[in-house]
Every structure is written in C-alpha cells, then in structure tokens.
Amino acid sequence: MEGETCAAKSMLTFAGMVGTWINMGTVLLGGSLGWALGERFPARVREGATAGVGLVTLILGAQMALRTQNVLVLLLSVILGGGVGWALRITDYLERGSRRVEKWFNGRPLAQGFLTASLLFCVGPMTLVGAIQDGLFGDWSILGAKSILDGISAAALAAALGPGVLLSLFVILGYQGGITLLAKMLATSLSGFDPTHPAVLELTAAGGAIVLAIGLGLLNLRDLKPANFLPALLFAPLLALLFRAFGW
C-alpha cells in the first residue's frame, strides 16, 4: 500500500513537469521534421517564428515584472544582480565554454548535433527562470514560449547536423526537468509556502526583467546579455525579506 502511494506521488510529480514535456515534444517534432526535410527547411519560417516568440516573450516578461510589490526592490535587485553578473562576465564564460566543448566534437556529426542542441536548449536564462516558474507555481508559460523557439531551432539544426539533435531530449529532461522538480519539492516541503509572499513575488518580478531582456534579444532590438542578470534572482528575495524586516 505504501509502495503504491509512493508510486502515485512520483507519477504526480513527473506529471507536474508540463513545461518540460511540452518542450521535449516540440524538439522531437521539430528535430524529426528537420532531419526528414534536410536543407529544404526554409530560413524565413525560422525568422518569422523567432520574431513571434520574441513578442510573446516581452508580454510574459512584463506580466511577471508587474507582480512586484516594491519597485525599489526590483530596481535594486536588477542593478546589483546585473553589476555582479557583468563583473563575473557570466555570458562570456558560458559562450566561451560552449565553443570550447563544441571543438571537442568537430568532425563527429552525431555528437556535434547532440552537443550543439543541448547547449542551445539548456544554457540560458529562459530555461532557468521558466523551470523555476513551472516548479513553484505550475506556470509553464515561459517554457511554452521557449518550446516553440526550440522546436523551430531543432528543425534547423537537425537539417544541418542530423539526428544527433534528438539526443538532446535526455538533457532537457534531466536538466530543465530536474530544476522544475527541485523547485516543486521546495515549494511542497516548506510548510505554509505562500506564492504571494513578497520574497516569491520579487523573485518572479526579477525573473520577468530577465525575460524582457531575452525578448529584446529575440527581436534583435538590443542584446542585453540576459545571463549576466541571473544573480538578480538571488538578490530579489533577499532584498524583499530585508525591506519587510525593516517595515519599508
């Protein structure tokens, strides 16, 4: 009986990873089509879809950012987080690491397709923010927008690099799904977890600011290097708790 209960809980937990399952589905579909069509996949479709995702991403980011209860907390978290991120050069290290790892697989199409797709689909702020949002609130809207973009990208990559792109599904499940599960377990293990708590709302608002930066990049309006602002996700809840303690 106890075993059946544990199994049921496990099934419910994995069922809660809606955003990750959708993301895997679009990558599977797009990668399969790209592999079948080869170089006949039109670049104009990819450009149009990316622009559409960029517009929706801006809307999602604005909705999240507007959840802030204290604009000063949001402002300080983004400024401090951005300052730390730019000082640490997070984006530069991620890009440099990606290029270095890709060189290891030159001349090996299957591995190159797998690695390139895995880095593209999982190394980025949209993955982190979206997975946390899905785990804490069951809100997979960010991952839904990411899924469309990843599906189009998977088609283009598979057309050029072959079926190795489809192997990235395991990385999406393990990395993105793992973050979602950790966030979900954190939310359920904390007694009296309140999604409307100021710390949680400010975390969401800071994530929204990062998502807005992603949207601007997708529309080719401005490259703000969104990954450099990831430390804002740490500063936002800390500042919210500090302001609440002092009654500000």
Image (spheres, rainbow, N blue to C red):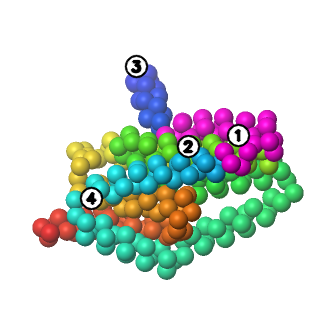
Q: Position of residue 196 (x, y in %)?
A: 23, 49
Q: Position of residue 82 (x, y in %)?
A: 43, 73
Residue at x 59%, y 46% (from the top left corner): 49
Please name the residue that numbered disc 4 is placed on.
68
**134 or 175: nearer the eye?**
134
23 within the magenta span: yes
**In this view, the mark in front (4 or 3):** 4
Q: Amino acid at mark 4?
A: Thr
Indicate which disc, 4 or 3, sits on the residue closer to the N terminus: 3
User: For the stretch drawn in magenta, what is the main secondary structure?
Assistant: helix
| Residue 91 occupies quadrant | bottom right
Marks 1 and 4 sit apart, C-alpha to C-alpha, by: 38 Å
Please name the residue that numbered disc 2 is placed on.
147
Marks 3 and 2 sit apart, C-alpha to C-alpha, by: 38 Å
Indicate which disc, 2 or 1, sits on the residue closer to the N terminus: 1
Q: Secondary structure at mark 3?
A: loop
Q: Amino acid at mark 3?
A: Met
The 10 Å Cα crowd at callout 3, few under 14, some 14 to 19, many 20 or more, is few
**187 or 165: nearer the eye?**
165
Res. 202 visible in picture:
yes
Give the numbered dot on residue 31: 1
Marks 2 and 1 sit apart, C-alpha to C-alpha, by: 12 Å
Indicate which disc, 3 or 2, sits on the residue closer to the N terminus: 3
